[in-house]
Amino acid sequence: MSKSKSQKANQTAKQYVLAPTETDAGVFWLNSLTEVFFRDQVLEHLFRKMEKENVLAWYSNIHGRNDKGVDFLLVVNSDFGQRIIGVQAKSKEVTRAGSGSNLSALQIKQECEGAMKHEFDVQKNKARLDNIELWCSSNITEDAEKEFNASGDNLKIQVKKASQIFSLVEKFAPDLLKKIPQCALASFVRDKRNPPPKKIKLLGCELHPKKHFLEPTFSKHSYGSAAGIQKTNSGLRRNAATVSIGDILFSNEHALVTAPELSGKTYLLEHIECLIAEAQAVPIVLHKDDFADGKITSIYSLVSKKLGFYSAHDIEELVKNVRLFLLVDDIDLLSDETRQVLFSQNAEQLKVIATTTRSINCPSSVEAVYMTGVNLGSVTKFLRGLDAKLADSKAFIDRAHSFISRTLATSGLPSNPFTISMMLAECQNSPQKFSTPTMGRLIERFVEMQLGSHSDNTIQVDFETKREFLTKLGGRRNSEFTLKEFKRELVKFIEGGSHPHTVDDFLLDLNHSGVFIFDGEKVRWSHPALKQYYWVKNLVKHDNLNPILEKLRKEYNLTLAALTGSQMQNGGKAIEVLVKELDKIKLPTPKVLLEVVKDSDILDLLRSDEAEEQLLSRLEQDGLGADESKERNPIISLAEYNLGGTEEFPGKTVEGQTGQTDDIANMATEGHLDAKASAELKRRLEPLMSKMAESKLHIAFNLASLLVNARNTKTATKQDCVRHILKAQQFMGHWFQDLIEAFFAESKKAKFDAIGARVFTQLMLTDRMIGDPFLVNVFKKMLGQAKSDEETLMLLDLLLGCGEDDYQLVVEKLRKIVSPELIVPFYLRVTVLYFFRFHRDKDRKALRELLKTIRRNTKSIRLLPVTT
């Protein structure tokens, strides 16, 4: 036989499979080998490596030199001295009796018995074997294995199976694995399944793409698209058309994910990469740099370069058996021709999942989805994934929910994994407190992360210089520039400060920072909050507050208020101006309904034990994020159970009443009003609308936003500020109560329920506005100075919400409050806290005791116990 024919005989046909593990891949590879290749290539190489490691003192390949069936002689070093082992190498399946295609265990056993009686040349001496082993790269049946170790036989033949042989190859000859494509592919997928953590730290923990993931929400319609509105019999409603990550991954279509700048698209692909590897498919992440000049010649050549152990032809064969996923980041940066090549692939074999910031043309067969926000229900799981101890610390998860919601509402920043992760990363956490950063700190950190620090080798201009330029540019009135105007500003800045950078250096950094959007010949700030941050910074620096205060007096602008407070640090001057505006608010006389209470059966907090169980179940599901398809507000639950019920939980009727409201209320709720009823309702509502318009309550919200961010303000000023905010909230609560009573004028029960709804709303909104741990000491000092029961309840609620656990103080204050219409909503608020902290046994137990004490001390009201 010629040399070339002999080489072909020793080679095995390439196998294109993806094994679950490297060991499985190695076993599959060994099973496919011919005996010649297994013996003379694999075992020869393995024994040579074992000899270098001093596991073997000596070895020799003696195949064909005798008729005793021994292929290798090994001298093995052990703790008990050296032993001489004979090895038979087999590559066919071994059964007990054997057949035409199998080897016989009985025959192999006879050969081994003969070999044990034979003398071999071992290191130039004649010697007999201490034992003999069978190394088989193929399968050995159970009955064959039993034959080799039959009881009563003097000779016990040790069997090395394919998995054991591969373990030795992994340990002593890992270089051999690089030549095994099946193993290299399994290793590649294993690494993608369990990637190393990133160097980015969040709350002290290095982010891991697989474990730590804030789940985005996806839709088939872009945000604000007319296609997202659906017509129904009752009118128009939003067409959610939501899409899950699973839908994106495992459909038989290519997918294009459109997401705004700074939304964590790259991290999304890294997470998807883990999911694909978990599903036993091959993920390959591609960036613009992987394409020569943004173009592509052969998709198989491209994949071959990324893998490194399969040729382009091999890839073409591989995709017939194994599904490959191409995860293309920023596909909008590639040419139209390249995108066409990518999307023309057979998605069942080679699927493309791409991200883009801007809209691009793609075939109709490509599934287009849009990232429209973040599922806040996944925050709990995200925090737990970072660190079990962290998630179990004091008042963390419920405060994180509140902080995120408030910050998103205040800043106007987009709700996406990037911004929310950044917010959480800036929080300070200890075993006792969860402390939030100011808005100024968040924006500053946000910009810093995008511009890069001076130690980053990929940037052209240092961070401090770019920050100085942004501060100057933020002082300009316009938020959009022509490219020519933008370059002119850069030239002025560079020449004015003699900076050693060119305009092109600046443009290169800023174009990739995400702080600005370069759209053809126009340049604009990527988000209004960024521009506003530098505008405020300029004015505060020059002590020119008038333009800011004028805006805060005239309009609702939480972002401006928050940025002003964080830049001033001591917000005394601004607070004094806004507080004077709120002095004009006058609170109405509290409405006490004790007579109504005595004459009715409406003191039950909940309608029945079943109703309470279902309420608590819903609250717990909200805390767990069980129903992630919708956000549920606790006030809705209150309305269901305290404002007349729903179809599922009908309200209890008051004795002597029909359970119905007056005619006007009935017709209003049904949407049918005659002329007389319409005029009467209008008469009731007009004064309320005028009252709200004249109140300027937007100032209270602006003031709260400013206060939470102005951390160095004097305590007395903070107290005065909080007092005015509580007063404004009470005003709004009474207005809300009057509104309900205007609709249900004749119902005594509705009046009682209106008070409960008002108080609950006041507690919830006040916590949302100023429920920040930095103000805890202020709340404590004000508690002893509270002028009304409502103010006391609001302060107690703020303390509980911020994680204070002095429950004895709460009980003492509640003993002095006898109004059932105040106790009922406060009890419900504590119940909400109980279920938001369901994961911490210590808090759960303490809050349950608090609820029990409130029930025990409130004899006149039936407050049902909280059950699990």
Image (tube, rainbow, N blue to C red):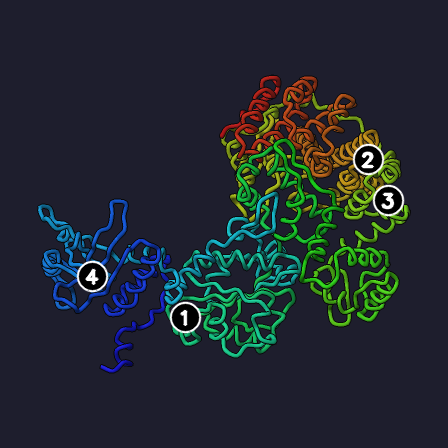
The crowding category of the residue bearing disc 1, from other C-alpha atoms within 10 Å (few below 14, some 14 to 19, many at least 20), is some
CA gap, disc 1 to disc 2? Answer: 65 Å
Please tell me which of labels 2 and 4 falls first in the chain: 4
Task: Tell us which disc is closer to us: 1 or 3.
Answer: 1
The crowding category of the residue bearing disc 2, from other C-alpha atoms within 10 Å (few below 14, some 14 to 19, many at least 20), is some
Q: Which residue is mark 1?
A: 319
Q: Position of residue 45 (x, y in %)?
A: 32, 64
Dots 4 and 3: beta carbons under 8 Å?
no
At horizontal 9% and vertical 49% (from top left) the residue drawn is: 153
The kind of residue tagged 2 is Thr
Q: Which residue is mark 4?
A: 124
834 sits to left or right of 57: right
Task: Tell us which disc is closer to us: 2 or 4.
Answer: 4
The crowding category of the residue bearing disc 3, from other C-alpha atoms within 10 Å (few below 14, some 14 to 19, many at least 20), is some
Q: Nearer the viewer, residue 569 or 404?
A: 569
The kind of residue tagged 3 is Arg
Q: Position of residue 820 (x, y in %)?
A: 66, 23
Any mark on residue 713, and which? 2
